[in-house]
Image (cartoon, helix red, strand yellow):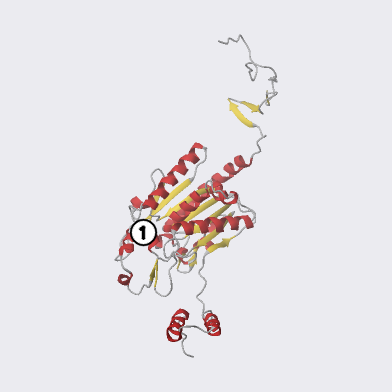
Amino acid sequence: MTQRQPFLSRIFRSRKQSGNIDRQDTSDEIASSYENPQPAFPDGIKVLHDCADATVDICFVHGLTGDRDNTWTAEGQFWPKTLLPLKLPGARILSYGYDAYIAKATSTASANRLIDHATNLLTDLTNDRALDNAPDRPLIFIAHSLGGLVCKEAILMSRNNPERHLRGIFGSVRGIIFMGTPHKGSWMADWAKMPASALGLIKSTNKSLLQLLETDNQLLESIQVRFWSMIRELREDGRRLEVTCFFEELPLPVIGTVVSKESATLEGYSAFSIHANHGDMVRFRSVEDNGFKRLLGELVRWKSQLGGASAAASRPASTPMLLTSGSSYYNHFGSGSQFNATGGTQNNNTGSGVQFLGSISGPVHIG
């Protein structure tokens, strides 16, 4: 069987020779163009581990030229699926995929910008959690490289989003682990300055993602400024967003360090190194890998804090808060009678003016 020529080139040649195209011929060509379709790109949410009593969602987001499976796999060990559930019971584990290939030799690279990827992440993750009947379940992101920027933009888009259902991600996120994320740009921006011909067999490039990684890129700076603004808002509201950064210890052969420690870390937050290069820093072979232990330690600590936070968030507005003073506990329900509940004299607060809780002996002077 002779190899079919690309659909568009055959149409162009036909137009050039006859000046028009027979409608039936065109239909045949369209049909033939689907005979050998490209494999579907693994994009969107993939559930790696589910559990009926899940108390937290953990979502993995890969970086440049990665995908939702291979980025996190070392020697056949897909550790988010095989290792993490054993050490983190009660966690529903997800992996998100998007076409972040900046250059392709055999097909067309996606033209999506970072904001497009962030929009898709926000929408897909919101839909998945709604289908699981848990739109408000606490959420933790683990993001590699460019994936960290996609996560930040998705969370920022969720904040004050005009679509109410899309605001749930901002309200639910409790922590982010950034792994080699170029918060301040990286050397890979130099690729954006290269002509396509200089990249060897590469036929298609997505330079918008590369340009984003320039150290003086205005969009990158804008994401960072808005992220810090969000952090301050959360602190003022009494809510803490946990953040931990990991950076690579080793350079890639020939290429060198991809994301420097300075670019991969955020001031005021914990930062740890992983003894690997940029690609291998997210590939763990066993639970004994020190990088896995460091990451797991953060997740276990954060997860242990969710119990108290979830209980406080779910407490009905009418439930009394207990204030302690020494060995006494005072219930304050608002207006009406006030009393202590530990025995002794009951003190009713039913009149106007200054009221005192608890027993009072001796003279009292006011003013």
Q: Check disc 1 and report its element: helix, strand or loop.
A: helix
Mark 1, other Cα within 10 Å: few <14 / some 14–19 / many ≥20: many
Question: Compared with residue 63, is residue 14 higher up or lower down, i.e. above or below?
Answer: below
- Residue 343 is situated, as x and y percent measured from the top left of the image, at 69, 24
Residue ranking furthest to the bottom: 1
Kind of residue indicated by mark 1: Gln
> Across the whole image, how many numbered discs are drawn on residues?
1
Q: Nearer the viewer, residue 244 or 149?
A: 149
Is 216 on the left-hand or right-hand side of 159? left
Is 149 on the left-hand or right-hand side of 170? left
- Residue 50 is situated, as x and y percent measured from the top left of the image, at 60, 59
Report the residue marked by disc 1.
Answer: 211
Look at the image and tell me whether residue 105 can be seen: yes
The residue lying at 39 percent from left, 70 percent from top is 204
Residue ranking furthest to the front: 19
- Residue 245 is situated, as x and y percent measured from the top left of the image, at 42, 51
Residue 206, image quadrant: bottom left
The residue lying at 46 percent from left, 47 percent from top is 243
Q: Nearer the viewer, residue 106 or 320?
A: 106
Q: Quadrant of the C terminus?
A: top right
- Residue 157 is situated, as x and y percent measured from the top left of the image, at 50, 50
Q: Nearer the viewer, residue 32 or 253?
A: 32
Q: Nearer the viewer, residue 255 or 328?
A: 255
Question: Compared with residue 354, is residue 204 higher up or lower down, i.e. above or below?
Answer: below
Residue 200, image quadrant: bottom left
Look at the image and tell me whether residue 278 can be seen: no
The residue lying at 62 percent from left, 30 percent from top is 322
